[in-house]
Amino acid sequence: RIAAVDGDAASGVHAFLHVDAEGALAQAAESDARRAAGEARHLLDGVPIAVKDVLATQGLPTTCGSKILEGWVPPYDATVVGKIKAAGLPILGKTNMDEFAMGSSTEHSAYGPTRNPWDQTRIPGGSGGGSAAAVAAFEAPLALGTDTGGSIRQPGAVTGTVGVKPTYGGVSRYGLVALANSLDQVGPVTRTVLDSALLHELIGGHDPLDSTSVDTPVGGFVEAARKGAAGDLSGLRVGVIKELAGDGWQPGVMQRFAETVDLLKELGAEVTEVSCPTFVHAMATYYLILPAECSSNLAKFDAMRYGLRVVPEGDPSAEAVMKATRDAGFGDEVKRRIMIGTYALSSGYYDAYYGQAQKVRTLISRDFAAAFEDVDVLVSPTSPTTAFPLGDKLDDPLAMYLQDLATIPANLAGVPGISVPAGLADEDGLPVGFQVLAPALADDRLYRVGAAVE
Ligand code: GLN
């Protein structure tokens, strides 16, 4: 299937940056042997998976969609990669993404865009467009993504797939090349809610190698998905977030969203409108905190330790090499965020920008806490629009950032979220996503509600 539809940077879906057919077939043969021997196997043993190229995979290239890491092969596995290997899931390859996970369209990949399988003139969302497109195009039944501001959920919405951002700390970040450490989470990208529950149970859990990993038992997701699929939501209190709708939201998106809310009522849920007034500041807050963290994280790409190394003619000094390498190796969006972050963190501006953003972040968490006193889950459309045409927002960073209006609050507060397909918009026939958010460590609720409406 990959050979038939994936193509390359110039045409086709282009979900993969690297395909490891040999490795995947060897793993599949091992799974077959285990089955033939009647050994106890994980439920997902032998089910192939695609991995976003921001996760370290021993022996397989890991580029983060950047030229600066071209040719780098990690000497170790991310914890989540180790877990899927141990359970016997063949790794099909590494999926395309916006450079260092910055973007909402996968057009910021240094290796060319991924195309949406529903309409190849359109974006597959981002930053994890490769993982979502691979699943949507039936190139992989499962994929791993990462979500810092929406990069699992928004691609899920615009490709008609399921995407989950677990509770912060619920899944190990060890071996995930950090975009913003305080926001990043690894999560499942699948075709059904039950598949996500299975994968989440496999990759979740405490990891001593990640200092922010939460030490509480993971589980109950599969059971919650099965309960939800049975279609009984009686007693569930659902809050519709008032601030995440209105001008600029595509009518077809709002229509499918309203119908899904009606379905929740039919299934017995109590639906109310909930106001989270600080959510309107979430985007501004995120675009200070994220650049601050990523400008610091990306300092390690210094031409000495990893990947690319450019030595300018006549000046081989460390400073000149560093400058030339970073200039050639980083794309425009990465450079933009390094500049914003460095500025926001500089002495004299720190309190006005970064410090202030951290305070607003606390207020956003308090809005969540207040809302979750009255309701069990919050809902909104995942993204304000369906998939837009390639190139449409490439020259307008703010328009691109607005794609994540509804997904960013969860990352700032560390709460879990899921996007499930909610049908196709009338005006363009493209997939719409329905977002469910739950309190920290109540990820099971995402699966119950998600499976009930999918
Ligand atoms: N689109 C958002 C950004 O550009 C989210 C990225 C992400 O979740 N990795 O930062």
Image: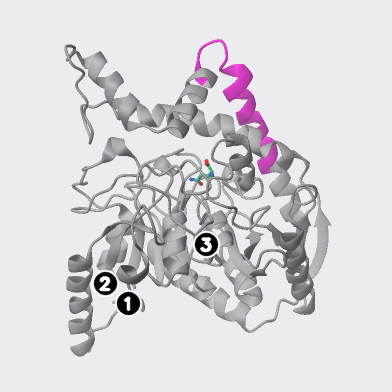
Q: Is mark 2 within 8 Å of ligand 1?
A: no
Q: Nearer the viewer, mark 3 or mark 2?
A: 3
Q: Is residue 218 visible?
A: no
- Disc nearer the start of the sequence (3/2): 2
Quadrant (top left, top right, bottom left, bottom right) of the C terminus = bottom right
| Residue type at numbered disc 1 | His
Depth order, front residue of 335/353 = 335
SS label for mark 2: loop
* Residue that numbered label 1 is attached to: 42
* Residue that numbered label 2 is attached to: 88
* Residue segment shown in magenta: 345-365
Q: Is 17 on the left or on the right of 256, as rendered?
A: left
Give the image location of residue 230, x and y in percent: 63, 84
Alpha-carbon distance for marks 3 and 1? 22 Å
- How dense is the environment of label 2, judged by Cα within 10 Å: few (below 14), some, or many (20 and up)? many
| Residue type at numbered disc 3 | Gly
Is there CB contact under 8 Å for labels 3 and 1?
A: no
Is there CB contact under 8 Å for labels 1 and 2?
A: yes
Image position of 358 with respect to 85: above or below? above
Give the image location of residue 425, x and y in percent: 69, 66
Q: Is residue 245 magenta?
A: no
Residue in the picture at 40% in, 44% down: 109
Q: Nearer the viewer, mark 3 or mark 1?
A: 3
Instruction: Identify the disc placed on residue 287.
Output: none
Instruction: Identify the disc placed on residue 163.
Output: 3
Image position of 27 with respect to 323: above or below? below
